[in-house]
Amino acid sequence: MKERLYIDGCWVEAEVYADLYSPFSNEKIAEIPQASLEQVDDAIRSAVKNKHEIAEMTTYERARILERLTVLLTEKRDEAATLIALESAKPLKTAYGEVDRTIETYKFSAEEAKRNVGEIIPMDAAKTGAGRFGYTQKEPIGVVGAITPFNFPMNLVAHKLGPAIAVGNSVILKPATQTPLSAFFIARLLEEAGLPKGVLNVVTGRGSLVGDRIVTSDNVNMITFTGSPEVGKEIIAKAGLKKVSLELGSNAGVIIEDAPDLQKVAHECVIGAYSNQGQVCISLQRIYVMEHLYDEFLEHFRSEAAKLVCGDPLKANTDVSSLISAKDLTRSMNWIEEAKQQGANVLAGGIIENNVLVPTILTNVATTSKVSCQEVFAPIVTITPIESIQEGIAQVNNSKYGLQAGIFTQNIHTAFEASKKLQVGGVMINDIPTYRVDQMPYGGVKESGNTKEGIKYAMEEMTETKLIVWNQN
């Protein structure tokens, strides 16, 4: 499969191509165009030229395009899931879940497009406001530069494109180097759904070349980025005065005070820790269990983790497959070794089988170990006993990140205390921090980001609020 760039409604060859390999089998699966700076500039010019066409479309027309996209994606659900599994090594059952979420994300975008309204301002509430009538209206920000990660190559693209199209923006999309096929796939479906030519442009290549060109361009009005805090900080430094929306990393924690069914909680925690090989921004990385439940929970968790099937992502029964790259596999093993040298015990996993890091359980982990204080982005979880809820809250908050956290408790006062004191963007009561549905506000504090995603909230970021005041005196 030889892909092409999507610029100004045309599929364009590049002078240079890079081979794309399966993270699991290391087999070549595609040739990916490496956009030149001139081609990136062409994509930006196209987005600028065509931003007025999408902005001047009626809300009904934009919503209809997104609705048609959901129909097309539903028809091609099998093809889409297989593509995700092939390029990212996401297990097929999980890839199907991503496709279903992607469909929902575009549906929500179509619905929210119809609710993108301003408000009436009571001008006469001010001493000098008598005889004046004011209101606001939402206007598209213009050209959006979207830079997306590998871990949800279809749904996180949807979280950029859906809101942007809904409010009438044009987009330059730069997908992750390892997972561009999903982005090209969606571009073709949007073309078929009737999106005007040039409203969406897709360019691939090195982030330091392609991404930087988009970020630094004065013709791009907003950057929306999902990825690491390190890259997020670089984007902020380079972007100038344009708006920048960042959804960054985490080392999400959960507190377990009590539960009527501890085995069920352990099962949920296993899903939260190991889904997509732990390559989820809100993957459950740190578990804090009240001391009197610790041994029982540990046994349940180990038993549930042992049921996971590791192997080929294209097999229907696989639960855990390869990390996105050999570099990440090496890093993860080094972090496990560091934790062991600092006193950690490996209760399960910690080994590589058939190019897959076996789901790993660590206990007695130092808070300074990278597997605890950094974002591990691998199937590794730490489990720690605590003596009080206050200790658990302090441990979760002992992080430079703050995306989401969870707590299992039957005590309503404990739940309210945790929801108030946990320093995160979202608190899940009696659930894992990995829980997310696509219409909810999603974003963190500290180094986990600076804005909110979720369709309605992303649309707010992607619009400008204009005030209109009528003087009736």
Image (cartoon, helix red, strand yellow):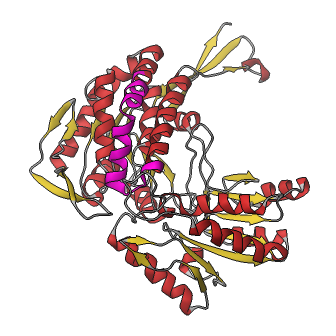
User: What x and y, as percent, mark residue 402?
Assistant: 63, 61
Q: Is residue 126 left or right of residue 98?
A: right
- Say which residue appears at 63% left-offset and 40% top-offset: 440
State the residue in front, 6 or 198. 6
User: What x and y, as percent, mark residue 47?
Assistant: 29, 33
Q: Does the magenta stretch include residue 283?
A: no
Name above or below for residue 362 compared with residue 131: below
Residue 397: quadrant of the picture: bottom right
Q: Secondary structure of the magenta portion, mostly?
A: helix
- Quadrant housing the C terminus: top right
State the residue in front, 291 or 206. 291
Residue at the extreme left? 15
Q: Does the magenta stretch include residue 73?
A: yes
Name above or below for residue 435 compared with residue 159: below
State the residue in front, 372 or 212. 372
Name above or below for residue 306 compared with residue 8: below
User: What x and y, as percent, mark residue 418?
Assistant: 80, 59
Q: Is residue 54 visible?
A: yes
- Say which residue appears at 68% left-offset and 59% top-offset: 405
- Say which residue appears at 55% left-offset and 76% top-offset: 371
Residue at the extreme top? 473
Magenta residues (range): 68-93
User: What x and y, as percent, mark residue 172?
Assistant: 32, 40
